[in-house]
Amino acid sequence: MPIASTLAPSTPSHVTVRTADGVDLAVREYGPHDGELTVVLLHGHCSRAELWTRIRDNLLRRYPTARVVCYDHRGHGDSATASWRTYNLDQLGRDLRDVLDAVAPIGPVVLVGHSMGGMAALTYISQHPHEIGTRITGVGLIATAANGLADAGIGRLLCHPVISLFHAAVRTAPTLMHHAKVLAGKAFAPVVRTARSGRRPVGPRMLTLADAMHNPTPIVTMSAYLKAFADYDRTDALATLSRIPTLILCGTADLMTPPSHSIAMATAVDYADLVLIEGAGHSVILEHPTRVTEALTRLITRATPETVTRPLALVA
């Protein structure tokens, strides 16, 4: 048995990073503070850093000299709320810069984003292309897209009149709308618990809906980011990614960001590692954490020096 598989993940270090516009972000650091490599895990819309738990722990066991950083986006999880006008992807790119400057000012960084987290990573890359190949040595894009969210899958609803009515209702009666979401979340709680426990499979359509309703993200946060998705386009960042190892992963049953988005991104990035997991939905990091970890292991191995990424292989 590899010794690495018996080591427990380290106790997290809780850090508060204040952004340039004064919003406190809840950041958690795992592994050695002077780790030779930093892997930053970025969660998706209406999610939080906790959803990376199994993948995070897997990576810490495989790479004990690396450091893993997770944080909640503004308006999500334990991070502070802010003006709804700042709930957009450009701001998430700036927030990522503030986090990196605070907790990983030096050394190689691998960015891994799920859904909106992947969009935040692409936005950061577009904002700081000079860091690709120097500070940023690898990127993982999971169940995400570079543009055209309103062109396929459930994303087509972004421009539907019903969604416009939803945004208007949230603006005029945010408290009432939030209470309705809380009630729906309680109804879907058993579905989410079942999916996370792995006791039996949950269909991708049901899990997508359950995750959206069960999470505690405020309704104003949910609405504002949805509006930002409608005209999102970071295809300019894809050519830059050809300079570094890039993983693009998606489930074949993803209704939010269908595989067509991942295939389009992989076509634009030289030597990208494209992984399609059969039958997985948008919550692929919950449904198939082992498969996702295997893909991230390949990414990290390609993106960093051997002395950093070589897992422990001693036999007990």
Image (cartoon, grey):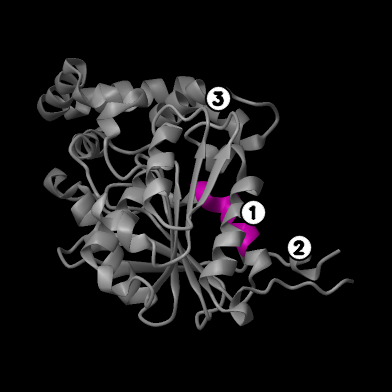
What kind of residue is marked 1? Answer: Glu
Quarter of image, res 126: bottom left
For image coordinates 41% across by 34% down, the residue present is: 260
**Dot placed on the residue nearer the N-terminal end, 3 or 1:** 3
Quarter of image, res 62: bottom right
Q: Which residue is mark 2?
A: 5
Please check the rendered image and state whether residue 114 is part of the magenta-colored stretch, yes or no. no
For image coordinates 37% across by 76% down, the residue present is: 135
Where is residue 134? Give x, y as percent: 37, 78
What kind of residue is marked 3? Answer: Val
What type of secondary structure mainly makes up the magenta span?
helix
**Dot placed on the residue nearer the N-terminal end, 2 or 3:** 2
Decide if residue 249 is on the left or right side of residue 315. Answer: left
Q: Secondary structure at mark 1?
A: helix
Q: Which residue is mark 1?
A: 294
What kind of residue is marked 2? Answer: Ser
Where is residue 309? Give x, y as percent: 61, 73
Q: Nearer the viewer, residue 3 or 305?
A: 305
Residue interval drawn in magenta: 51-59
